[in-house]
Amino acid sequence: MSALQGLAARFLSRAAPAAVGPVGLDLAQEKLHMVQFEEKGGELQLRARISIPYPDSRAELIASPRRFAAFVREALKGAPFAGRRVVTCLPAGACRILNLSYQVEAGKSADEAIVTEVMHRIGGNVDDLVIDYLPIRSRGKGSTEHTVLAAVAQRAEVIAYLDTLTGAGLEVEALDIGPAALRRLVASLDRENNHPSVLLVNFGREKSFLTVIAGKRLIMDRELNFGERNLVDQLGQRLNMQEDEALKLLYRYGLARDGDGLQGEGPGPGDEEIVKSIAEILKPQFLEFTDEVHKALIYTASETRGESVERVELLGSVADYPGAARFLGEMFSIPVREMNPLALFDRSPRPAGLDDSESPVRMALATGLALRGFSAYE
C-alpha cells in the first residue's frame, strides 16, 4: 500500500535538536502561516509565529520556485524561527478525506481492505494515488468491521509539493494529515485531561470543514461547500456593494453585539441596526450550514454510542467576525466559542520580532502541525 508516510520515508520524524520543535507550515488559501514551539523548564512555549499574505495567488507563487524560495526566506526572517525543519500537510483540495467502514476478510490485511474500499469509492488507478489512514474505532472485540479516516492524494501532487518545499531550502520532517494535526491541537488545550468531545468548524474562503474529536479519537472530517465567499456575495448583492466593501463591513460590524472587529474597532453603541441587518441578510445562508452541523452531531452520536458533542469551536475567517460565536450559538443546542489555538502557549515574555499581525483563529492548523513530535500531544 502506498502511504503519505511511506512515500516521504526520507523525511521520517526524528528527535528535535535541543528543545526546539519543527516549524508548523500551513500554505493556506491566502496566506502562509507558520508556528514554532520550544520547551523551557519542562513547559512548552511559543517561540515564533507569523502569517504573511502571498504577493499573488498561491498557485502562481508555487509555480515559480525562485519566487517561492525568496518568499519563504523572508517569512522565516520575520520572526525568531530556529532552523528549517518543517511539518506540513497538503494544501486543502489536494488531499481528500474519506470516512470509511471496512471488513477484513480472512487472508487479507487491513491495508488491503482499506485500499479496496478507497478504490471502490473514488475509482482510478491505485498506483497514481498516495493513501494513508487514521483508525476511528472497531465495532467490538473480535469484530471484523472497522472505521477509519482515509487520506487520499494524487501521487504526482504529493511529490510536486515536497519538491517545492525542499527546493525552497526546507527540510520536511513529516507530511501530516490536517485532521490529525487538529486532534493534536485539541489535546494540547485539554490541560485538565477531561477528553471532551468537540466539533471544530474551520471556515475557509471557498469551503469549510467540520472535524469531530471525541477524547483522543478522530470521529469524522467533512468538507462543506460553504465559505466566506458565500456570505460576502450575499451581502454584496443585497446591499449593492463591491466584494471588498462587503468584507470590511463583516469584519467591522459582525453578526452580533460582542467581540472585536476589524483592527480591534468592533461595533459601537449606535450600530445595533447595522448589525441586525447583516444578521438578517445572512441568516438563510447560515441555516443551510447549521443543517450540516446537526447532521455531523447525529453522525457523532451514532459512532460514539450516544456520546454527545460538548461544544463547537470556531476557527478560520468567520470566527473573526464580531459576535460570530454568539450568533451561531443561538442556532445550536450546545455552547459555541472561538478557539484560540495559542491560548496556553502565549503567556511567556514575548521574544523580539514575534509577529502579532494575524488573529490566532486562522493559525490552528499550523499550530497543530508544530506540536508534532512533542510526545505529550501525540
Image (tube, helix red, strand yellow):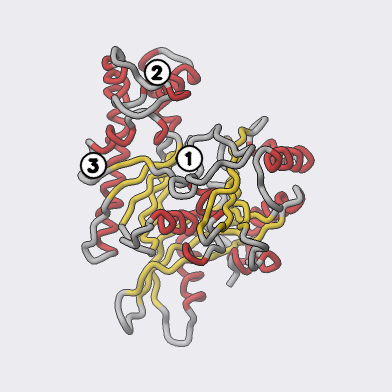
Check disc 2 and report its element: helix, strand or loop: helix
Q: Which residue is mark 3?
A: 332
User: Which residue sits at x=67%, y=52%?
Assistant: 161
Q: Is residue 131 above or below residue 323?
A: below
**Which residue occupies the extreme right position in the image?**
66
Tag 2: residue type? Answer: Gln
Depth check, mark 1 against mark 3: the one in front is 1
User: Which residue sits at x=54%, y=63%?
Assistant: 374
Locate residue 20, reporting x and y percent.
Answer: 62, 57
Q: Which residue is mark 2?
A: 237
- Asked if the residue at tag 1 contacts the one at tag 2, i.e. Cβ–Cβ closer than 8 Å, the answer is no
Tag 3: residue type? Answer: Phe
Could you say which is closer to the camera, residue 292 or residue 116? 292
Check disc 1 and report its element: helix, strand or loop: helix
Q: Quadrant of residue 145?
A: bottom left
- Asked if the residue at tag 3 contacts the one at tag 2, i.e. Cβ–Cβ closer than 8 Å, the answer is no
User: Which residue sits at x=42%, y=43%?
Assistant: 340
**How far apart are labels 1 and 3 at the CA level?**
24 Å
**How far apart are labels 2 and 3 at the CA level?**
27 Å
Depth check, mark 2 against mark 3: the one in front is 3
Tag 1: residue type? Answer: Pro
Q: Which residue is mark 1?
A: 360
Left or right of residue 155: residue 141: left
Q: How many marks?
A: 3
- Near mark 1 (Cα within 10 A), the count class, few <14, some 14-19 or many ≥20, is many
Locate residue 191, reporting x and y percent.
Answer: 38, 58
Could you say which is closer to the camera, residue 57 or residue 199? 199
Left or right of residue 314: residue 24: right
